[in-house]
């Protein structure tokens, strides 16, 4: 099932589903990874040797938090 934000209801998403131009978070890759390193954005999960993903629940929580702070 898909929510309004274009993310699946549960599971994992890859970076291209999270950040611009297709994702709900309007930042580029460099800014995203800097935010992950600083703790501003959720930590990824390695699901394979060359595959990194994020829990949909973590991304939804981030969207909610960013909506409240306006940043």
Image (cartoon, rainbow, N blue to C red):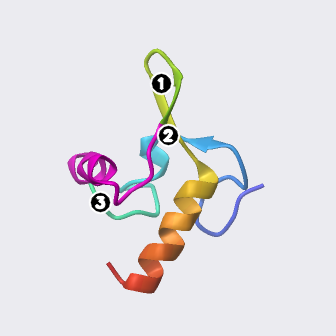
Judged from the image, the secondary structure of the residue bearing numbered disc 1 is: strand
Which labelled disc corresponds to residue 67?
none
Q: Residue at x 45, y 57 (%)?
A: 23
Judged from the image, the secondary structure of the residue bearing numbered disc 2 is: loop
Residue located beneath label 1 in the image: 51
Gap between marks 2 and 1 measured at Cα: 8 Å
Q: Residue at x 39, y 83 (%)?
A: 69
Q: Nearer the viewer, residue 18 or 71?
A: 71
Q: Is residue 11 left or right of residue 19?
A: right
Q: Residue at x 34, y 55 (%)?
A: 39
CB under 8 Å between callouts 2 and 1? Answer: yes
Q: Is residue 59 left or right of residue 30?
A: right
Q: Quadrant of the N terminus?
A: bottom right
Gap between marks 1 and 3 measured at Cα: 20 Å
* Residue 26 at x, y percent in the picture: 34, 64
Question: Is residue 34 magenta-colored?
Answer: yes
Count neighbours of disc 3 (C-alpha within 10 A) and say few if under 14, some if 14 to 19, many if 20 or more. some
Residues in magenta? 29-44
* Residue 10 at x, y percent in the picture: 72, 50
Is 61 located above or below residue 51 in the figure?
A: below
**Residue at far front of view:** 39
Residue located beneath label 2 in the image: 14
Is 51 located above or below residue 39 in the figure?
A: above
Q: Sequence-wise, which precedes: disc 2 or disc 3?
A: 2
Gap between marks 2 and 3 measured at Cα: 14 Å
Q: Quadrant of the C terminus?
A: bottom left
Residue located beneath label 3 in the image: 27
* Residue 16 at x, y percent in the picture: 43, 44
Count neighbours of disc 1 (C-alpha within 10 A) and say few if under 14, some if 14 to 19, many if 20 or more. few
């Amino acid at each position: 099932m898909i929510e309004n934000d274009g993310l699946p209801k549960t599971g994992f998403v890859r970076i291209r589903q999270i950040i611009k131009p297709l994702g709900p978070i309007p930042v580029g890759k460099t800014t995203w990874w800097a935010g992950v390193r600083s703790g501003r954005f959720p930590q990824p999960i390695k699901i394979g040797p060359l595959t990194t993903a994020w829990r949909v629940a973590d991304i939804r929580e981030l969207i909610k938090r960013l909506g409240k702070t306006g940043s």
